[in-house]
Image (cartoon, coloured by chain):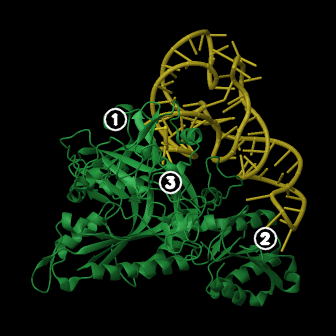
Amino acid sequence: MHRWSQLFIPTLREAPADAEVASHKFLVRAGYIRQLAAGIYSYLFLANRSIKRIEQIVREEMDKIAQEFYLPAIHPREVWEASGRWSVMGDNMFRLKDRKGADLCLGMTEEEIMTEIARKELRSYKQLPQIWYQIQSKFRDEPRPKSGLLRVRQFTMKDAYSFDMDAAGLDVSYQKHYDTYCRIFDRCGLRYVAVEAHSGSMGGSQSHEFMVYTEAGEDLVASCPSCHYAANLEKATSRLAPVQDLTPTGNGLPELIHTPGKGAIADIVAFLEISATQDIKCVAYIAQKTAADGKVLHQPLIAFLRGDHTVNETKLLAIVGGNELRTMQTEELEKYFNGPAGFLGPVGVNPRPKEKLGDWSDPADSRSAFVILDSALEGRGNMICGANKLDYHYRNVTPGRDFHYTVAADIRNVVEGEGCSNCGTPLKLGKAVEIGHIFKLGYKYSKSMGATVLDKDGKEVTPIMGSYGIGIERILTSCIEQNHDDNGFWLTPAIAPFHVVVVPTNVADAKLSAAGLEIANALEAAGCDVILDDRDERPGVKFKDADLVGIPFRVNVGKKLVEGKVEVVRRSTRETLEVAVADVPAIVAKLIAAGV
RNA sequence: CGGGGCGUAGCGCAGCCUGGUAGCGCACCUGCCUUGGGCGCAGGGGGUCGUAGGUUCAAAUCCUAUCGCCCCGACCA
């Protein structure tokens, strides 16, 4: 049994000034963590206990479907070059040199290492499917670490990888993970949702993120209150209410109109007394892609959307398969539009053909650009748009007739209240933290790294892969985000550092002290994880600390002991039961089994 | 990467503008007291003021550089 007086649990009355989100404040105040550098934290006694329990739950559930490995955190450059990611990862990767000058990096994920093993060892279809996982520290040199343990540069990740003969096999492995993740997060006491996620430019076909709704989150999730549709904003679609096109004027063809100083959409809308839905917005980017050989490639990428819509850059980028977007500079706008910012429009822009999508080589016609039309503009007509001429717009512009584009695609952000694409119900939008991600990888790594097995017919086949991650610390932080009040937080017994804290209100009183010890022993004998607060502190101090540190149940041994009774307190609700000393173990055990 | 803010005792802060003995609250140590929600009294320890340079008789304070940490943005012309 643990005695508080002998432990290092450095609780703080005040939170450090730089903590913003609840989990950060409380993890520091409760003596769970201390910061070493930006995005790098030491986990003290309580945090370590809680994290070990989370890992244990993950391990128990994963062991039902997979085999645990333990892979290196330091990787040689060659392995990452084989997949092309040595250069693609850019500054997000921590790199180092050994004494001989050889390049190494700290692992960000382990696709390469797992695939390397598969490549060397897997020979026959008879060995598949395989699912391998590990729980390891991961390193990412985040451009901006923040929010305590929520966005850090070193963290613990459970990462799993599946190898199957074919897509049908991958479906099975994927579903196994989906189900396993649900069991894991249920056991951790999280309220979460599995959402459709953007599957990136890696040829992945399907992907789900497991999200926890909280204001501290950095992702936005669109969800439908009536059907089960839920998706990351980077993937979400919606049904739009119909909008009215303007009536054509004159001969119905594009017509210049003088719009002095009305560059912004709000201005032009007011000036012409139209709706922003009748205007075409233009956003011009240079897309960048780092090739496997480290060369940085560029492409002009121009998006046209309805005036009241906003670009989702992830969706846009996925169309060309790049890794980064930046907006065009003035000279570039001049080059591709021959017009000034504020008055840019699609008429006269020279679109590259659809077949060239994904082709990053320089075209002969250097003034052409990839032009993406948002799907919401398909079928629209007589719209207002910039004329690529200072202080002029066009009216009567109809997509497809008056200008052409490379491709039409969904590239806009869904807005709260738009109809669910399944059932039409208005969608809700909420901030969320990503705690897990499952992902059909396809052949990217197995192919680039040359992993093959022989099938029944003796033919070489490239296995199809999946990868599946869980952020261990994020389980802890999102539990705290979901379960806290002004005084502290409470964790579900399964992941709390202790199930119950026994608090004799005055240890100078030999009777209270002895009873506290006896109760703590009895609780332990009943299978509870107990901490006895045997510190010579005033009751107020001990109560405050007990409330702070995340332990779901408390037993107060105090005044009522003379009647043979103690108090059992549920931290989440403060609900208090008066219980005879002899009944404490059974009652507490029952409470623990039922959860917070 | 862009913008902003902050570095003074373990934590939270004041002092800086207007240069002149480094302070407050909490925490910590000792003693007494107290014991159901961070109790009281008395005494005490702890800081080369992020670092480096400069200005000055004198720098926490002014100037320059640098490092670190936090926040916002990297979204529409």
Instruction: Provide the residue designation for mark 3.
Output: A245
Rendered location of residue B16, percent (x, y): 69, 23
| Residue A76 visible in the displayed image | yes
The tint chain A carries is green
Q: In this view, does A269 lie above or below A88?
A: above
Q: Name the subunit of mark 1.
A: A
Residue to which mark 2 is pinned: A507
Disc on the earlier residue, 3 or 2: 3
Q: Nearer the viewer, mark 2 or mark 1?
A: 1
User: Chain letter of disc 2?
Assistant: A
The residue type indicated by label 2 comes to: Val
Q: Could you give the CA–CA distance between mark 1 and mark 3, rounded to whole angstroms?
A: 32 Å
The hue in which chain B appears in the rendered picture of the protein: yellow
Q: Quadrant of residue A70?
A: bottom left
What amino acid type is highlighted by mark number 1?
Glu
Name the spot of residue A258 as percent of width and height, x first.
49, 32
Give the percent coordinates (x, y) of residue A95: 31, 49
Answer with left or right where residue A411 lies relative to residue A97. Answer: right
Q: Please say if A561 is above or below B5.
A: below
* Residue that mark 1 sits on: A332
**Left or right position of A393 against A442:** right
Front residue of this view, candidates A264 and A587: A264
* Residue sitting nearer the eye, A268 or A91: A268
